Image (tube, helix red, strand yellow):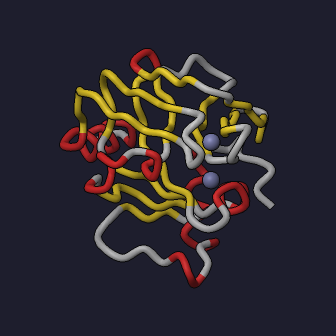
Amino acid sequence: MTDAAARDALIAPHRRTGRLSGRCLCGAVSIEVDGKYVAAIGACHCVMCQRWSGMLFGSFVAETQGVAVTGPVRSYVSSSFSERGFCETCGSPIWLRATDRDEPEIELFPGLFKEAADFALLSEIYTDLAPNYACLKGEHIRRTRAEVQAKHPFVEGDN
Ligand SMILES: [Zn+2]
Ligand SMILES: [Zn+2]
Protein backbone atom coordinates (compact mmCIF):
# COMPACT_ATOMS: atom_id res chain seq x y z
CA MET A 1 0.00 0.00 0.00
CA THR A 2 1.36 3.45 -0.84
CA ASP A 3 1.53 6.17 1.79
CA ALA A 4 -1.32 8.01 0.10
CA ALA A 5 -3.47 4.86 0.12
CA ALA A 6 -2.63 4.16 3.76
CA ARG A 7 -3.58 7.73 4.68
CA ASP A 8 -6.85 7.45 2.76
CA ALA A 9 -7.70 4.21 4.58
CA LEU A 10 -7.21 5.90 7.96
CA ILE A 11 -9.22 8.97 7.02
CA ALA A 12 -12.07 7.14 5.28
CA PRO A 13 -14.09 6.29 8.44
CA HIS A 14 -14.06 9.98 9.40
CA ARG A 15 -15.28 11.44 6.11
CA ARG A 16 -18.56 13.32 6.43
CA THR A 17 -20.78 15.48 4.32
CA GLY A 18 -22.88 18.10 6.07
CA ARG A 19 -22.95 21.43 7.78
CA LEU A 20 -20.85 22.92 10.55
CA SER A 21 -21.07 26.43 11.95
CA GLY A 22 -18.18 28.10 13.70
CA ARG A 23 -17.11 31.50 14.90
CA CYS A 24 -14.10 33.31 16.29
CA LEU A 25 -13.75 34.49 19.89
CA CYS A 26 -15.24 37.96 19.33
CA GLY A 27 -17.92 36.72 16.91
CA ALA A 28 -16.95 39.04 14.05
CA VAL A 29 -15.87 36.11 11.85
CA SER A 30 -18.15 33.22 11.09
CA ILE A 31 -17.28 30.04 9.22
CA GLU A 32 -19.91 27.88 7.57
CA VAL A 33 -19.05 24.47 6.21
CA ASP A 34 -21.58 22.95 3.85
CA GLY A 35 -20.02 19.99 2.11
CA LYS A 36 -17.33 17.42 2.63
CA TYR A 37 -15.02 17.44 5.64
CA VAL A 38 -12.97 15.03 7.76
CA ALA A 39 -14.24 14.72 11.33
CA ALA A 40 -10.79 14.01 12.76
CA ILE A 41 -7.97 16.19 14.01
CA GLY A 42 -4.34 16.37 13.01
CA ALA A 43 -2.15 17.96 15.70
CA CYS A 44 1.17 19.65 14.93
CA HIS A 45 3.92 20.56 17.39
CA CYS A 46 6.22 22.32 14.91
CA VAL A 47 7.62 25.58 16.23
CA MET A 48 5.50 27.69 13.87
CA CYS A 49 2.29 26.00 15.02
CA GLN A 50 3.30 26.30 18.67
CA ARG A 51 3.91 30.01 18.27
CA TRP A 52 0.72 30.64 16.35
CA SER A 53 -1.55 28.67 18.68
CA GLY A 54 0.23 29.57 21.89
CA MET A 55 0.26 25.94 22.97
CA LEU A 56 -1.32 23.19 20.93
CA PHE A 57 -2.27 23.32 17.28
CA GLY A 58 -4.80 20.95 15.73
CA SER A 59 -6.90 21.19 12.60
CA PHE A 60 -9.31 19.30 10.41
CA VAL A 61 -9.77 19.57 6.66
CA ALA A 62 -12.81 20.59 4.65
CA GLU A 63 -13.35 20.89 0.93
CA THR A 64 -12.60 24.53 0.17
CA GLN A 65 -15.57 25.00 -2.14
CA GLY A 66 -17.99 24.20 0.70
CA VAL A 67 -16.43 26.68 3.14
CA ALA A 68 -17.76 30.22 3.51
CA VAL A 69 -15.95 32.69 5.77
CA THR A 70 -17.45 36.09 6.53
CA GLY A 71 -15.99 38.91 8.59
CA PRO A 72 -12.66 40.68 9.00
CA VAL A 73 -10.08 37.98 8.22
CA ARG A 74 -6.46 38.86 7.57
CA SER A 75 -3.82 36.43 6.49
CA TYR A 76 -0.19 35.87 7.28
CA VAL A 77 2.17 34.19 4.83
CA SER A 78 3.92 31.80 7.21
CA SER A 79 6.04 29.92 4.69
CA SER A 80 6.74 29.70 0.98
CA PHE A 81 3.85 27.27 0.66
CA SER A 82 1.21 28.26 3.22
CA GLU A 83 -0.85 31.08 4.60
CA ARG A 84 -2.69 31.41 7.93
CA GLY A 85 -5.92 33.36 8.30
CA PHE A 86 -7.00 35.02 11.55
CA CYS A 87 -9.67 37.39 12.85
CA GLU A 88 -8.25 40.90 12.71
CA THR A 89 -10.26 41.91 15.78
CA CYS A 90 -9.61 39.08 18.28
CA GLY A 91 -6.79 37.13 16.61
CA SER A 92 -8.51 33.73 16.59
CA PRO A 93 -6.94 31.39 14.00
CA ILE A 94 -9.47 30.86 11.20
CA TRP A 95 -7.76 28.76 8.54
CA LEU A 96 -4.49 27.45 7.16
CA ARG A 97 -4.09 26.80 3.47
CA ALA A 98 -1.55 25.89 0.83
CA THR A 99 -0.42 28.65 -1.50
CA ASP A 100 1.98 26.71 -3.71
CA ARG A 101 -0.54 24.41 -5.35
CA ASP A 102 -4.19 24.11 -6.19
CA GLU A 103 -5.19 22.32 -2.97
CA PRO A 104 -8.89 21.35 -2.87
CA GLU A 105 -8.96 21.34 0.94
CA ILE A 106 -8.48 23.98 3.61
CA GLU A 107 -7.53 23.41 7.26
CA LEU A 108 -9.95 24.68 9.89
CA PHE A 109 -9.74 24.75 13.69
CA PRO A 110 -11.95 22.53 15.82
CA GLY A 111 -12.18 24.96 18.71
CA LEU A 112 -14.29 27.31 16.56
CA PHE A 113 -16.97 24.67 16.00
CA LYS A 114 -19.11 23.22 18.79
CA GLU A 115 -19.88 20.23 16.58
CA ALA A 116 -16.20 19.30 16.48
CA ALA A 117 -16.00 18.40 20.17
CA ASP A 118 -16.41 14.70 19.42
CA PHE A 119 -14.01 14.53 16.48
CA ALA A 120 -11.31 11.89 16.83
CA LEU A 121 -7.60 12.64 17.14
CA LEU A 122 -6.14 11.16 13.96
CA SER A 123 -2.51 12.14 14.00
CA GLU A 124 0.20 14.06 15.78
CA ILE A 125 3.31 15.34 14.01
CA TYR A 126 6.62 16.83 15.20
CA THR A 127 6.13 14.73 18.32
CA ASP A 128 9.78 15.14 19.32
CA LEU A 129 9.17 18.91 19.62
CA ALA A 130 6.06 18.50 21.77
CA PRO A 131 6.37 20.33 25.10
CA ASN A 132 5.68 18.50 28.35
CA TYR A 133 2.38 20.29 28.77
CA ALA A 134 0.99 19.16 25.42
CA CYS A 135 1.26 15.36 25.58
CA LEU A 136 -1.64 13.73 23.77
CA LYS A 137 -2.77 10.33 24.97
CA GLY A 138 -4.43 7.56 23.05
CA GLU A 139 -3.88 5.53 19.93
CA HIS A 140 -3.13 7.72 16.93
CA ILE A 141 -0.46 8.19 14.28
CA ARG A 142 2.70 9.78 15.64
CA ARG A 143 5.48 11.20 13.48
CA THR A 144 8.71 12.91 14.50
CA ARG A 145 10.14 15.94 12.78
CA ALA A 146 12.61 13.75 10.85
CA GLU A 147 9.83 11.45 9.69
CA VAL A 148 7.69 14.38 8.53
CA GLN A 149 10.51 16.20 6.81
CA ALA A 150 11.64 13.09 4.98
CA LYS A 151 8.33 13.24 3.14
CA HIS A 152 7.83 17.01 3.00
CA PRO A 153 11.28 18.42 2.25
CA PHE A 154 10.03 21.97 1.79
CA VAL A 155 9.05 22.63 5.38
CA GLU A 156 10.97 25.66 6.58
CA GLY A 157 10.88 28.43 9.13
CA ASP A 158 10.18 26.08 12.02
CA ASN A 159 12.80 27.37 14.39
ZN1 LIG B 1 -12.85 37.68 16.22
ZN1 LIG C 1 2.97 22.87 12.33
Q: Which residue shows up at 66% across the image and 38% down it?
A: 87
Left or right, 75 with respect to 98, comes to right
Q: Is residue 30 above or below residue 154?
A: above
Q: x, y (%) of residue 136? A: 42, 74
Q: x, y (%) of residue 130? A: 59, 73
Of residues 31 and 9, which is closer to you in this image? 31
| Quadrant in the picture for residue 18 | top left
Q: Which residue shows up at 47% across the image and 26% down it?
A: 105
Name the image quarter holding the N terminus. top left
Q: Which residue shows up at 24% across the image and 36% down it?
A: 15
| Quadrant in the picture for residue 80 | top right
Can see residue 149? no
Name the image quarter holding the C terminus. bottom right
Can see residue 9? yes
Q: x, y (%) of residue 123? A: 40, 57
Q: Which residue shows up at 43% across the image and 65% down it?
A: 142
Q: x, y (%) of residue 77? A: 78, 35
Residue ranking furthest to the bottom: 132
